[in-house]
Image (cartoon, grey):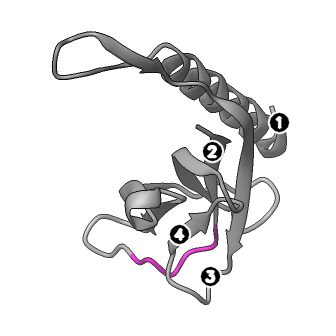
Amino acid sequence: MSNAVGTRLLVAGLVAAVVAAVGGITFASASGTNTRAARVTGYEIVQVHNPATQPADVTVTCPRGKRALSGGGKVVAPGPGLEMFGRVVHSLPAGGPRRNGWRTAIAAGLPGNESLMVEADFYAVCADI
């Protein structure tokens, strides 16, 4: 499986998991009754490429009016047939109370000699909710 195909499958699986999870959430009031069910519509994946000349600590912002449901990133291999592995330092919602972005940092290299200076792709799964 090529990286492009693997990435598409990974991202498609992430979207399906997020949509399934969020679609089943209901919110309860103080009295314990359901006040509304969350609806997920208009989901899309926003991608940002980060060159190795910049620290791989990136916030991906959703289009206006959408919120980030999830996100992440992956290290880009330095050449055909080569693999490079990274470690997610953090992956969390961003954008204040609007939660319209997802911030992820990736470090790569040998333990004790890791660097944030790595080429990587970052993603945010965005939707109208």
Res 52 label: 3
Q: Are marks 2 and 4 in contact (CB under 8 Å)?
A: no
- Where does the image place residue 67, in percent across and percent down from the top left? 57, 50
Q: Amino acid at mark 2?
A: Val
What amino acid is labelled 1 in the image?
A: Val
Q: What is the number of the mark on residue 33?
A: none
Q: Earlier in the sequence, mark 2 or mark 4?
A: 4
Distance between mark 3 and mark 2 Cα atoms: 23 Å
Kind of residue at badge 3: Ala
Question: Dominant secondary structure of the magenta stretch?
Answer: loop
Q: CA distance from mark 3 to mark 4?
A: 16 Å
Q: N-terminal of the two: label 3 or label 2?
A: 3
Disc number placed over residue 5 in the picture, else none: 1
In the foreground, 96 or 110:
96
Residue 32 at what x, y percent from top left?
A: 20, 12
| Mark 4 or mark 1, whichever is nearer to me | 4
Real-space CA distance between mark 1 and mark 2, rounded to the nearest whole angstrom: 18 Å
Side (left or right) of 74 relative to 35 = right
Pointer 4 residue? 59
SS for callout 1:
helix
